Image (tube, coloured by chain):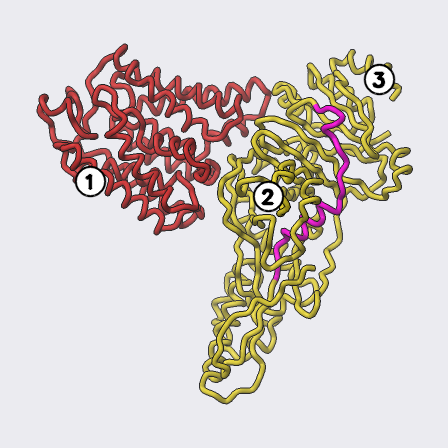
Chain colours: A yellow, B red
Amino acid sequence: MKRLFFGAALAATIGWSSATIGAFCGFYVAKADTKLFNRASQVVLVRDGDRTVMTMASDFQGDMKEFAVVIPVPTFLTREQIHVGDKALVDHLDAYSAPRLVEYFDDDPCDRRRYDMAMPMAAPAAARDAASRAKSLGVTIEAQYTVGEYDILILSAQESSGLETWLRQNGYRIPSGASPVIASYLKQNMRFFVARVNLTEQAKLGYAYLRPLQVAYESPKFMLPIRLGMANASGPQDLFVYALTRNGRIETTNYRTVKLPSEMDLPVYLKDPGEFSTFYKAMFTRQVERQDRSAVFTEYAWDMRWCDPCAADPLSADELRRLGVFWSGDTRGGAASAFLTRLHVRYDSAHFPEDLVFQETSDRSNFQARYVLRHPWTGAGSCPAAAEYSRTLVDRHTREAEQLAALTGWNLAEIRKKMGSDVAAGPEPAWWTRLWK
Amino acid sequence: MADPRLYQIGTLAVLLVYGIGWLEFDITPVRAALILASVLGTQWLCDRLSGSPARFASTSRSALISGLSLCLLVRTNDPALACAAGVIAVASKFLIRIRGKHVFNPTNGALVAMLLLTGNVWVSPGQWGAAAFFAFLMACAGSLVVTRAARSDVTLAFIACYGALVIGRSLYLGEPMTIPLHRLESGGFLLFSFFMISDPKTTPDSRAGRICFAALVAATAWYVQFRLFRTNGVLWSLAAWSLAVPALDRLLPAARYIWASAPAPSRSTATTTGADSPLTSRAA
């Protein structure tokens, strides 16, 4: 029996197709959710004090019997500390916090009222034998549970080689570079949480996909072990961390945490199907390069009780509780006070040598990756203001094209071509602007 | 010898500009100006109230160093708390003294006080990143400062002890060397080593005392960071061990440090002095 081995960051080998972007109620809102990124894993971290609830969502799409996950955890976990969650909750969190595209419409310049109106608010076991075999290898099966469709083992070991042998004998495909990584976690008294799908239970439950695993534990360690996941990785992996905290946003303490460029005016052609997702992927890749591939990016930081504009409704108190916001019962009637930080990291072993360590800050300022389209006013006007408006439009479109080129590294001439008549009225860019692109 | 604080001010100012301009530090130029104004204002006021013989032209240099360090380290959304950090940094030099020597490094004391007393201040140790060239630059600039301040021993002892502990732990765990090096290449670590623990006014007077002090700070910082898993281990550790400096000075006595530009005070005034007046002048 061969099983896929997943490291801590739940790296998936099967990609998703690009997201289909839909239009809502007349006003277009696009978002760049995690489905855009291949090999992406998602982790929800609920943290307050030393208490952590971690929800791990896998985008695994292969044969269920091939699925296995091995995660180092800081403490022993009892049956009650493990739960199978609802994938819809993670999807909702993803939709709520995804980078978004919004649009505004210019007013009639001849109309004296000048204001910007924000349009889009679219809310849219042969047990004994196994145990003795394990013992001979120095591996202790500390506990064994069946939770939902998963068979779960909590393992500890004296020697990494014993654990490795045990995992191999039991059908887990361990990458060659994993041994020293396992050894260092064992020396730190970490346990290994091993889960695989119990096909009988899964058939009974009737789920065609894998539901996220949730674990709750108490430990001063506020970190995500990513090293094991990198041992067999062939390239960089994308990881999304959604942190729900009581006080403020989280950041990494051993890597730079950088906010993505946001609030830019961009050419309106990005509204066309597929254009925004292409833009976002290109922009993210360029920002990763700019930060020497060694930064963690903040995509969203917001008080969970509201949003503006909303890419999706905020999560309800009940949804938050099910994700592990254990203090949600503290509030009387009102929504639970939880602050959401969405971090996006593209990591590989060369640039992320150590595990991600986090800290919660008291920073409650709001941030969102938000990109703006401004539609020009198309009416006919003969007042002097209309003539002035036309002149400013040319400059504006030129600026939008340049911003897009700077954010993505795309060719300016091609952007201008795509913008069509918007920039036709303006002067051609100087010949040297194309020279070193 | 020129006043080493001028080099320190220059280096910290360059770091601040680099931090704001290139590393997107969570601090605006206006906030930085506010912090600097609060430290300078407090220094001027405390000098007046304490009847210090030191001229403001000299004492303001120390205040400026504290202010610039705070700009690099303290993060808060509340401008009042940023000002409060500046006031505490300078006022602590006048208020918390043992045998005429102030106890806490002003920046360190202010940061720890703000972290303990308010829930709205944080320090972002990861924001410097680990770009090797930058670490190298800081180390060079920093070493220049400490060598001129004749306190390179405490910095070197601290780096050696902390480095040995971090590398030693990784060796024990079988981790690749990239892990401890990544931890030591941090700009925040170098900033602490070269600009904070090296403060000649709050470190022990004797060389043996300073090396002992550096080793204690390093061991505790390592313990907080890697055994208790709390951030900013170096800040907590330095503040805690600062309390032991009077004892170290008693056990291992030596002449007290004096800034090169400070006026040589008479012995009679020195015992009741303001922040920058030494009890005794350095022999050299």
Q: Nearer the viewer, residue A174 or A413?
A: A174
Q: CA distance from mark 3 to mark 1?
A: 75 Å
Q: Secondary structure at mark 2?
A: loop
Packing grade of label 2 (10 A; few <14, some 14-19, many >=20) is many
Q: Nearer the viewer, mark 2 or mark 1?
A: 2
Under circle 1, the secondary element is helix
Q: In the figure, residue B190 lies in which quadrant?
A: top left
Q: Position of residue A49 (x, y in %)?
A: 56, 31
Q: Which residue is mark 3?
A: A130
Q: Depth check: A19 or B181 in front?
A: A19
Q: Secondary structure at mark 3?
A: helix
Direction from residue B130 to residue A171 in the image, left or right: right
Return the residue nearer the eye: A16 or B221. B221
Quickly name the residue at label 1: B44
Type of amino acid at the residue the image marks with label 3:
Ala
Q: Amino acid at mark 2?
A: Ala
Q: In the rendered view of the protein, which quadrant contains the N terminus of chain B?
A: top left
Q: Residue at x 66, y 40 (%)?
A: A44
Letter of the chain that mark 3 sits on in the rendering: A
Q: Earlier in the sequence, mark 2 or mark 3?
A: 3
| Residue drawn where x is 73% and y is 55% of the image | A18
On residue A338, which mark appears?
A: 2
Query: Which region shows up in magenta?
Result: A77-101
Residue A187 found in image quarter: top right
Count neighbours of disc 3 (C-alpha within 10 A) and say few if under 14, some if 14 to 19, many if 20 or more. Answer: few
Asked whether A258 falls inside the magenta stretch, the response is no
Kindly tell me whether residue A415 is visible in this rendering: no
